[in-house]
Image: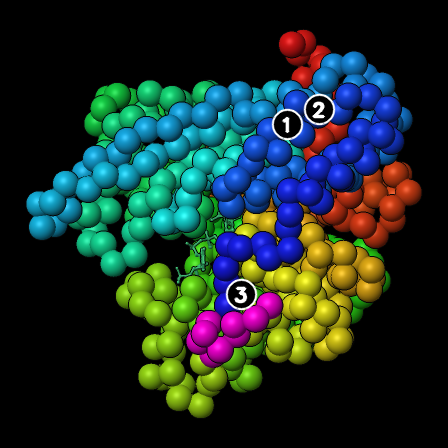
């Protein structure tokens, strides 16, 4: 079962955590934010604060040791987006009914380069969710070492069940407003949940029509008109490259021959499964918003791609081809647990959405002898789950480091577009692999430097924050 609800998160806990950080560093750290947290009511805001709380917790020793960050009010400045665009999207469905949705673009921070980050189309999208994703994106993009700031956008539009024409008309209407705020040196959106090559193609087509320019203004474009080879595979492959590097660094056995569990059945999950299978791992699960497939002989990837990327149907249809596999509908896991994480595994890969791996799931993973957890989705594990995993010395790879492969290849796409060239699959793959290894190394070294060896959460937050913070100081207010 996957849900956006983080059951145990409370504003009270956030407030006390911030106050704790505040007390430790003896400055008025984010006093302003505390007042805003007190007023927060929506689930989206709570998720944003959850992401912020984790980072504040990790960076406290850095803030404590370097007064420049306090003097320049970096935390106060970095936790508020530069600007948020919110707009009406009006479009005509196939029955000629007028439909109205809300569109957003959160431009969070451009200290390191143009605003960069995906677009999400899902009914759960709201400003708070996009602020959480945009905030995470700043630090993720910083970790890549590439010139990109952080942003996120999207709409509460649900592409599910819509015809290609409806998706096209929605994308065109969305771009009618969005084009005013983006540009290849300004802000470069890409895909995320509900936005893949089809949607990026329609968005790009409309941008080109409105502006009469052929700019690399979106990444994740189809290859025939400027997309990078390997962008579709990049996030999932990067997740596995990161895991390989982490297991090596932590002196754990490699993935070959090991049972792995993956949640999700979209872009990230599919390409994580693909790379794991290529390395000889046995992937036994995948899931969507309706349920989980457990296939002990290994998930049939070709069938999964056909069901989710071509036919866009529910995973239950996997049983038509493999009636002996197990399908566990979400209703069968009503209380505090998720089917995917109940399956024993060596390595687990949450690749669906935020807060899909809870404390109870983490306990089950530990009890079943799991050795590593890598976050393919953005913030899929709750804080309580992360604590259990870290306390039990599980190798834990946080999203902002482990799933950076997507935005890394997006940056490669921007480079290729800038000089109107195309790189080979092999070149992109080699550069991606090297970048993921570098990120992994930097995160581990940073953790060691700050006295939390093996804690990749703190390592990623500190390393990501430090680079942006130093740039903000150098650029002045
Ligand atoms: P897709 O839309 O391709 O797939 C998402 C998958 O997760 C689907 O299986 C979907 O189920 C399920 N899902 C999504 N949202 C929910 C929800 N609220 N409740 C239940 N199920 C849900 O998205 P991606 O694979 O691109 O993205 C997956 C995760 O990875 C997200 O957290 C995203 O932010 C992150 N990510 C994506 C990157 C990219 O390049 N695409 C890069 C880095 C991170 P169903 O099929 O039923 O809809
Ligand atoms: O969360 C992410 O890193 C993405 N959705 C990809 C962002 C990008 O600009 O490629």
Instruction: Report the side of 88 relative to 260 (left or right).
Output: left
Circle number at residue 436: none
Query: Marks 1 and 2, Cα distance to the nearest angstrom?
Result: 7 Å
Q: Residues within 10 Å of mark 3 (few under 14, many from 20)?
A: many
Q: Residues within 10 Å of mark 2 (few under 14, many from 20)?
A: some
- Residue located 83% across and 43% down the image: 447
* Colour option used: rainbow
Task: Tell me residue 28's x, y (percent).
Answer: 77, 21
Instruction: Report the side of 120 relative to 243 (left or right).
Output: left
Q: Is residue 307 above or below residue 12?
A: below
Dot 3: what SS? Answer: strand
Q: Quadrant of residue 251?
A: bottom right
Q: Is mark 3 within 8 Å of ligand 1?
A: yes
| Earlier-in-chain disc, 2 versus 3 | 2
The residue that disc 3 covers is 263
| Earlier-in-chain disc, 3 versus 1 | 1
Q: Report the number of discs.
A: 3
Q: Is residue 172 visible?
A: no
Question: Extreme bottom residue here?
Answer: 324
Look at discs 3 and 1 and give the one toward the viewer: 1
Circle number at residue 31: 2
Q: Which residues are magenta?
A: 328-336
Look at discs 2 and 3 and give the one toward the viewer: 2
The residue that disc 1 covers is 35
Which residue is more in the foreground, 17 or 158? 17
Q: Is residue 321 above or below residue 226?
A: below
- Residue located 72% across and 69% down the image: 363
* Residues marked 1 and 2 touching at CB (< 8 Å): yes
Task: Tell me residue 419's x, y (percent).
Answer: 44, 26
Which residue is more in the foreground, 173 or 57? 57
């Amino acid at each position: 079962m996957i849900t956006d609800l983080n059951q145990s998160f409370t504003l009270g806990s956030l407030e006390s955590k911030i106050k704790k950080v505040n007390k430790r560093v003896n400055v008025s750290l984010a006093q302003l934010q505390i007042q805003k947290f007190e007023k927060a009511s929506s689930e989206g805001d709570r998720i944003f604060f959850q992401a912020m709380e984790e980072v504040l917790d990790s960076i406290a020793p850095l803030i404590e040791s370097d007064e420049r960050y306090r003097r320049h009010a970096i935390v106060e400045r970095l936790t508020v987006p530069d600007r948020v665009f919110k707009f009406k999207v009006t479009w005509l469905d196939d029955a000629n009914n007028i439909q109205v949705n809300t569109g957003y673009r959160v431009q969070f921070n451009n200290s390191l380069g143009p605003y960069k980050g995906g677009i999400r189309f899902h009914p759960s999208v709201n400003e708070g969710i996009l602020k959480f994703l945009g905030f995470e994106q700043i630090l993720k993009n910083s970790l890549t070492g590439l010139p990109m700031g952080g942003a996120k956008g999207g709409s509460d539009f649900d592409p599910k069940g819509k015809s290609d024409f409806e998706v096209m008309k929605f994308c065109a209407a969305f771009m009618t407003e969005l084009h005013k705020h983006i540009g290849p040196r300004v802000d470069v959106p890409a895909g995320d949940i509900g936005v893949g090559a089809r949607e990026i193609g329609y968005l790009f087509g409309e941008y080109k029509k409105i502006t009469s320019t052929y700019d690399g203004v979106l990444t994740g474009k189809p290859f025939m008109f400027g997309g990078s080879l390997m962008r579709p595979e990049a996030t999932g492959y990067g997740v596995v490259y990161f895991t390989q590097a982490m297991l090596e660094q932590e002196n754990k056995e490699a993935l070959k021959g090991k049972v792995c569990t993956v949640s999700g059945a979209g872009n990230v999950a599919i390409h994580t499964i693909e790379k794991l299978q290529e390395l000889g791992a046995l992937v036994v699960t995948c899931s969507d918003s309706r349920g989980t497939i457990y296939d002990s002989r290994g998930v049939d990837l070709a069938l999964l791609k056909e069901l989710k990327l071509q036919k866009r149907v529910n995973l239950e249809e996997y049983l038509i081809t493999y009636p002996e596999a197990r399908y566990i509908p979400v209703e069968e896991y009503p209380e505090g647990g998720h089917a995917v994480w109940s399956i024993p595994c060596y390595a687990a890969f949450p690749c669906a959405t935020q807060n899909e791996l809870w404390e109870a799931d983490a306990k089950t993973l530990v009890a079943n002898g799991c050795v590593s957890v890598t976050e393919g989705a953005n913030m899929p594990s709750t804080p309580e789950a992360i604590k259990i995993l870290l306390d039990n010395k599980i190798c834990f790879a946080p999203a902002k480091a482990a799933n950076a492969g997507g935005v890394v290849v997006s940056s490669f796409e921007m480079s290729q577009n800038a000089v109107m060239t195309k790189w080979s699959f092999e070149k992109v793959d080699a550069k991606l692999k090297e970048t993921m290894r570098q990120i992994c190394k930097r995160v581990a070294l940073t953790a060691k430097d700050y006295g939390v060896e093996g804690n990749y959460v703190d390592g990623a937050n500190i390393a990501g924050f430090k680079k942006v913070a130093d740039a903000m100081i150098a650029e002045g207010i």
